[in-house]
Amino acid sequence: MAGIALEALDDVPWERLESALGHHPPKEMRRTLRRLALKGGAATEEDCYPLFDCFALGTERVASVATAALPFVVALAGDPDMGARATLVQLLASSSKMAADADPGLVDAEWQETWRAQRPRIRALLADPLPEVRREALPLGEGVGVLLERWHAETDPTVRLPLLLALGTAAAGSAQAGPVDRVRAVVAEVLRTDSPVMRVAAVHAWAAFDPQASVRELDLLVEVLSDPAVRPQFEAIWYVPDVDRAFTREDVISWTAHLFEGAPSTALSFVVQLIGAAHRNGDTPLCRAALDEGWKLLVVLPSAASALLPLAGALLAEPDDGVRYRAAHLLAVLGSRAAPYADALAALLDDPGEDEFLEGTVGDHARWALTRIGDERALPGLVERLYAPYRGQYSRGYVSGDPRLPEVEDVLTLLRAHAQALLPAVRKLLRDDGVGGSLTCCFLEVLKAWGPAAAPALPEVVALLNDTRYSLHAIDALVAMGPAAKSAEPAVRRCTVLDFPGNHRKVAWAAWRLGGDRDMALRLIGEAVLTEGEPHYGPVGLLGDFGPAASRYADRVRHVMEHGDSWLRLRAAIALWSLTGEPEPTGSVVEDYLFLIADGGDAYGSFLDALRALARIGTVSPAARATLRTVRGSDRRLSTYRDYRAFIHDEEIRSAIDDVLALP
């Protein structure tokens, strides 16, 4: 029996205590502690999981049952005959952090005093004979002094390294110069005299309280991280508390890249130098890791393209599938800038290479890159390849921030100039997959974007009007086709939609746009705008399509513009200009959405709508023009996305900015 006396456990009045979660009552805490004590040295990490549940770490609340259990957990963690001691120390560290971060009103009144009473036994864990226990106990070392004491005594490299990192964190949290100076002396000594991996750790520790340290030590970081002979040493000693495995060199590269978040030019230099070293040394894992960090930079910093573009182009010829995959994806997101590498990309169209954890093949990304360049060699089989991941299923699995295949509509909507070549495949898939298909709405979105060029698909779109899942999307596609879809007007009037007033108004609007009764549609939509109150105020956006014919509703639209929420205010302002033909007050309202972005906002959807509205109105104020020049010159992706969509949206917004700046 380990660590605790079962009699003492039974003496606790568990039934009078409170737990943080009702489905983990206090008696469950007693049962779990008893099971661990009885198992003793045979106890495993899995045996401790119910104890984590009883402490309810995710609730940000320390209940009285946790206070009562604390001495028993400390005793078990310190008992050399107990199994899974490192896991129990992790529980202590997590509980301490939760208590420190929680609202004081949610922390049991006895917790702090109980913790203080246990402090000598908790501190003893820092000097435990087992390295893994000492390592997990590092977050329990309170203050720089305690950690420095351990630093001078510690000899195991798997503990010294995380201890060094802990010293940096402690110095960052210290308000006194003395402790910080003592830690600075330690990391400076490690930088001068210790092993390569420990020197990298010293930079991390120093950067915790002096962010410029990583910038100053860039050459050291690149030298060590790009040395193939040093690579195995990272996995030998780079451990941190609460992580069961060692960090690989590639893990450390990613961690190191975050040190340069305030120094983008240094971050780019770090990545470029690592890629160059990997290419020279044939170091495939390094090349993959560096390309991943280059991608993360590129997705937020347009300026990174100049340095990364030629590197990606050269890496298309690498023998490693993962390197070619990343290089092709990087070229794809850069669009027309990748044109010099079109022939190399075309040579990879049938490349089956894949990365274990990323989506698609090298050939898929090369084909997409060619579509972004505008190279017709991408067109044969394009639609079928885009559809392939969905065949027989309704979704795909991916991590949104990683390189991945683009959505079908994000590729095809930009290819209106090639609609004639692509339409046969799209129409076939609509016929084959149209009822209940996973991409039906996506293809309708594509046809809407293609506008009149999509007119040959009229039969396939009309066939979807009687399915409520697709009818509204089909209506939009038909309206976008323009006069070529006039014959569909009777079918639109009869189409099936969910019985909601807004849907019926949209049907009337669409029928008018295809040659039907304008007055009836205007009356239906106008009356809805007049009578509906906040927060929606009726279909103001649809009313704007009628132009001066709807001028009698201008006062109501102005009211909506003045009283609606941010989203509705913009649409009402645009509609008001359409009804009156007067640039003001629409121009002033619309320009407000430009200034929000210049001030650091991220409402890029409204920003783009405002830009398009100004281009239609045809005037822009000097202040708005200056704001747009500032935004246009900023080194940031004008998008909230952090995957390939960031590039598409950024291009779209910058093109719209150029249109407005070109106004007289």
Image: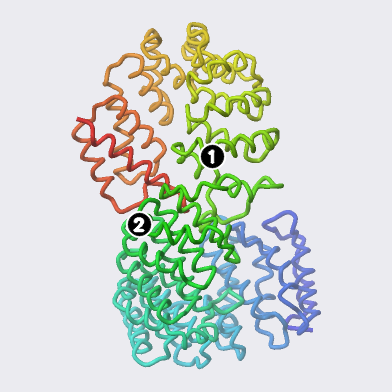
Task: Looking at the image, tell me whether mark 2 or mark 1 is earlier in sequence order.
Answer: 2
Q: Position of residue 634 (x, y in %)?
A: 28, 50
**Dot 1 alpha-carbon crowd within 10 angstroms: few under 14, some 14 to 19, many 20 or more:** some
Amino acid carrying label 1: it is Leu
Residue at the (64%, 79%) spot, across then down: 86
Q: Position of residue 7 (x, y in %)?
A: 80, 77
**Residue situated in front as seen by the camera: 632 or 411:** 411
Amino acid carrying label 2: it is Leu
Residue 422, label in figure: 1
**Residue situated in front as seen by the camera: 630 or 156:** 630
Residue at the (67%, 33%) spot, across then down: 431
Give residue 204's quadrant in the image. Answer: bottom left
Query: What separation in Å lies between label 2 and label 1 (alpha carbons)?
Result: 33 Å
Position of residue 15 in the picture relative to residue 192 (left or right): right
Residue at the (61%, 74%) spot, across then down: 90
**Residue situated in front as seen by the camera: 593 or 482:** 482
The residue labelled by disc 2 is 301
Q: Dot 2 lies on which element? A: loop
Question: In the image, which is nearer the foreground, mark 2 or mark 1?
Answer: 1
**Dot 2 alpha-carbon crowd within 10 angstroms: few under 14, some 14 to 19, many 20 or more:** some
Residue at the (66%, 40%) spot, across then down: 438
Position of residue 572 in the picture relative to residue 410 (left or right): left
Count of marks overlaid on the render: 2
**Residue situated in front as seen by the camera: 100 or 48:** 48
Q: Position of residue 463 (x, y in %)?
A: 66, 25
